[in-house]
Amino acid sequence: MSTAMPNPAKSAETTAAGSPSLLELENVTAFYGDLQALFGITLRVNPGEIVTLIGANGAGKTTLLRVISGLKPTASGKMLFAGQDVSRVPAHKMVARGISHVPEGRQVFPFLTVRENLSLGAYTPRARAGMKQALAEQLALFPRLSERMDQFAGTLSGGEQQMLAIARGLMARPKLLLLDEPSLGLAPKVVDEVFEKIQEVRQTGITMLIVEQNVVSGLSISDRGYVIQNGSVTLEDTARSLLGNEMVRAAYLGL
């Protein structure tokens, strides 16, 4: 896998120049019943960036993605997407606005074919209108799937299922792609392949927010990152700086 770092200065220049963030959260909180899961989360994702969230299991990273995609309501705070307040917008309308969520564990439909799984990704009327072109684009990006179009998704390897899950998310024509643990349960060689594909997705102009336990792989392809601990952002920096941060290295890299 290529570990060439993106240019964080470029993102900094974009922000400094006043270009609006694609996604912006300000003091967002969320609960599961009486249990508070997120505490005043503030973050941004700029157009064209890859941003990675790192943190221990149970830190709130997956909950944060669920809030952003509308699967989990915010209790307070503000969330803006493309300059519009989407704090109370439900998930099916978030897809229409341009946010696509690839969940942890891939969650493909095992007894549907690859073709059928991809078709289900074209959820919105706009996506359905362009489904033929979108399908051609995904099969060009993930050529292995083109060889398995009539195969049940449950018979694919773990890496192939992850590629199918990403391709299904892209079928919705998103502006922002949320990826939750794309390397989960995959062999190291397959992890490299998946992250190479994520970099190819970036070249199409799609902005991405990634939750990833494999800190080196996640940050190595990212512009910036956030450390999430106990439902709060405790550190924000360029990906390069986070990889060199002593606290990050001690806590998440065992160094």
Image: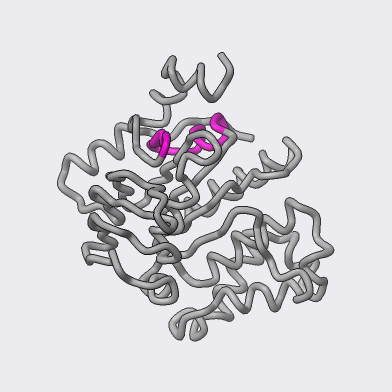
Q: Residue at x 44, y 49 (%)?
A: 209
Report the magenta residues as a range: 215-230
Q: Is residue 205 visible?
A: no
User: Is residue 80 located in the magenta-colored stretch of the structure?
Assistant: no
Q: Position of residue 78 (x, y in %)?
A: 23, 57
> In this rendering, would 212 be left or right of 183?
left
On screen, 222 above or below 182? above
Q: Position of residue 17 (x, y in %)?
A: 16, 43
Q: Position of residue 49 (x, y in %)?
A: 38, 46
On screen, 59 above or below 36? above
Q: Quadrant of the C terminus?
A: top right
Of residues 77 and 4, the one drawn nearer to the viewer in this rendering? 77
Report the colour scheme: one colour
Specify the quadrant of the image occupied by residue 133: bottom right
Q: Position of residue 187 (x, y in %)?
A: 76, 39
Q: Residue at x 80, y 55 (%)?
A: 157
Specify the quadrant of the image occupied by residue 82: bottom left
